[in-house]
């Protein structure tokens, strides 16, 4: 969403209004898209070839919304950021591994669960943290840093935790994440730096573009695995709900255990529990099997629903130690 400007008195622009509406209804839009793709998959299977380009557009939008202040929190709150990133890449991967080990899942599904658990944070979390009256600046910084380190950490985690299920090519995963994530973000940053006027005119449309993009990714992934979802979707949904719930809960517990203030606890909770499931789905289809993308597809729907519910709960309970909101830029994922 566009950066919050307390001095702004100008009427809301069309792009900003559509972006706000898209962000508000995003969970229901994704839920409807997933249901439609399961019930009528044929019209959407052609979108499978466009998953990577769609993800690159979403990441390009993220790059264009980033600014220097997003990295300033590294100096202002390094402890909170480090704790959040450690929680992100410890709690979710180990929880995913524990679930697939206990439940003895099909190898492709097991790899899919671990892949989505080892993915970086999703940018939709920034909106959820903002609505939850959490530390939005910390949320944006966690999303950014986890995304930037993902090319190294995610392949290593998948190799370590999923290598016994299916062959894992960490170098291939590294190249794919750099292609899908790092290159578009860098291009977005360069565009903002050297074509700032152009970017300012279009950046307010990026939340809407991202909502459309991730909706198309969900349609592509779900339609390509509709048979698997119909056969075992409830079981995978149960795993996804537990994975997401553990991430949200333990993220909050970890932040509280080290003494972070309530706004930061909420930010860490949401960041840990919400993953870049679109990226996980794209990697699963490219490097493993269509079935491996099913957990990410279901996660993409569920974590936006659970995140919205949690944000709504917290929004009615402002933290006593809340700091002023710094910004709420985000794109959906």
Image (tube, helix red, strand yellow):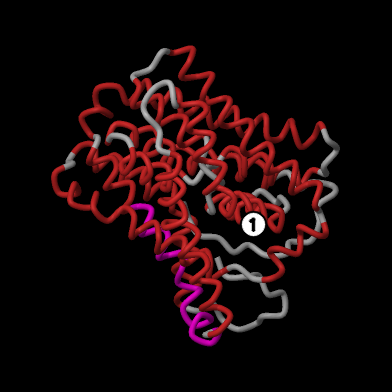
Q: In the figure, is residue 115 to the left or right of 282?
A: right
Residue shown at the point (18%, 46%) measured from the top left? 45
Q: Position of residue 21 (x, y in %)?
A: 46, 62
Residue shown at the point (64%, 71%) measured from the top left? 67
- Span colored in magenta: 196-215
Indicate yes or no whether the magenta region holds residue 125. no
Q: Which residue is nearer to you in this view: 106 or 237? A: 106
Check the picture and name the quadrant holding the N terminus. bottom right
Q: Position of residue 264 (x, y in %)?
A: 76, 46
Residue under pointer 1: 140
Per the picture, the main secondary structure of the magenta-coloured stretch is helix
Residue shown at the point (42%, 56%) measured from the top left? 180
Residue 23 position (above or below residue 299): below
Indicate yes or no whether the magenta region holds residue 209. yes
Residue 313 position (above or below residue 211): above
Q: In the figure, is residue 119 to the left or right of 314?
A: left
Q: Which residue is nearer to you in this view: 164 or 13? A: 164
Residue shown at the point (82%, 42%) measured from the top left? 260
Q: Position of residue 66 (x, y in %)?
A: 60, 68
């Amino acid at each position: 969403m566009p950066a919050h400007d307390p001095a702004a008195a100008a009427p809301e622009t069309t792009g900003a209004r559509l972006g706000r509406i898209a962000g508000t209804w995003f969970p229901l839009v994704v839920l409807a898209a997933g249901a439609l793709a399961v019930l009528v998959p044929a019209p959407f299977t052609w979108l499978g070839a466009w998953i990577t380009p769609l993800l690159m557009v979403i990441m390009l939008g993220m790059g264009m919304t980033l600014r220097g202040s997003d990295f300033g929190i590294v100096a202002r709150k390094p402890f909170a950021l480090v704790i959040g990133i450690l929680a992100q890449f410890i709690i979710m991967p180990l929880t995913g591994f524990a679930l697939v080990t206990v439940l003895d899942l099909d190898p492709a599904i097991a790899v899919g669960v671990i892949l989505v658990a080892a993915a970086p944070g999703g940018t939709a979390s920034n909106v959820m943290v903002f609505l939850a009256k959490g530390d939005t600046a910390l949320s944006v910084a966690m999303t950014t840093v986890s995304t930037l380190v993902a090319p190294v950490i995610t392949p290593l985690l998948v190799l370590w935790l999923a290598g016994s299920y299916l062959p894992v090519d960490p170098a291939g995963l590294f190249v794919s994440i750099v292609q899908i994530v790092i290159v578009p973000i860098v291009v977005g940053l360069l565009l903002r730096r050297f074509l700032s006027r152009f970017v300012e005119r279009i950046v307010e449309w990026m939340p809407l573009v991202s909502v459309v993009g991730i909706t198309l990714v969900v349609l592509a992934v779900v339609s390509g695995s509709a048979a698997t979802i119909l056969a075992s979707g409830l079981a995978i949904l149960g795993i996804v709900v537990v994975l997401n719930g553990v991430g949200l809960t333990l993220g909050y517990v970890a932040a509280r255990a080290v003494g972070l203030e309530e706004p930061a606890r909420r930010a860490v909770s949401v960041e840990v529990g919400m993953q870049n499931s679109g990226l996980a789905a794209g990697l699963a289809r490219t490097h493993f099997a269509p079935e491996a993308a099913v957990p990410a597809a279901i996660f993409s729907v569920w974590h936006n629903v659970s995140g919205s519910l949690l944000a709504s709960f917290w929004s009615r309970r402002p933290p006593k130690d809340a700091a002023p909101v710094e910004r709420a830029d985000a794109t959906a994922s």
